[in-house]
Image (cartoon, rainbow, N blue to C red):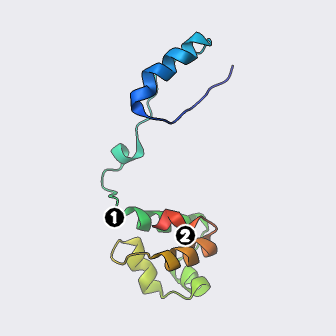
Amino acid sequence: MVELCFTGPAAKRQEAMDCLRGLGFEAKPSDAIPWRAAFPEITNAALPGVCLRGARAREGLTQKQLSEITGVPARHISEMENGKRPIGKAMAKRLGTALGVGYKVFL
C-alpha cells in the first residue's frame, strides 16, 4: 500500500481524483487544513519575520547569537522578526547563509 499527496489547482481536483480511482486508488478523508486557515493572525506582511524566527529557533540561536554571526544588530533582528523592519534581498541572503536556508523565505 502506498499513500500519495499532490498539490495542484483546485479546479482540477475532481479530474485528478477520477483518474486515480481508475488506477485503483481511493480517497480517504483528511483532517488537514491549509496553514493560513490555522494561523489567520500570520499575514503576508508578517510571514518573513515568522520565517526568520523559526529558522533561528531551528538552529538553536538567540537573537544576540545571530547578531554576532551576521553582524546585524540584535535590535534589527528583533524588529525584522516582529514585522517592524523590512528584510531586503541583501539582508535575506545574509540571514539565509547564516541560518542554512534559501534566502527567498525571508522576502
| Residue 69 can be seen, yes or no | yes
| Distance Cα–Cα, label 2 vs label 1 | 19 Å
Graded by Cα atoms within 10 Å as few (under 14), some (14 to 19) or many (20 or more), the crowding at tag 1 reads: few
Give the residue furthest to the right: 1
In the image, residue 83 sits, relative to residue 2, either above or below, namely below
Where residue 38 sits in the image (x, y, percent)?
A: 36, 45
Nearer the observer, disc 2 or disc 1? Answer: 1
Quadrant that contains the N terminus? top right
Left or right side of 98 for 90? left
The type of residue carrying mark 2 is: Arg
Residue ID at (49%, 75%): 89
Residue that mark 2 sits on: 56
Please, what secondary structure does the residue beneath circle 2 have? helix
> Would you identify the image quadrant in which residue 61 lies?
bottom right
Q: Quadrant of residue 48?
A: bottom left
Under mark 1, the amino acid is Ala
Q: Mark 1 — residue? A: 45
Q: Where is residue 19 in the image (x, y as percent from the top left)?
A: 54, 16
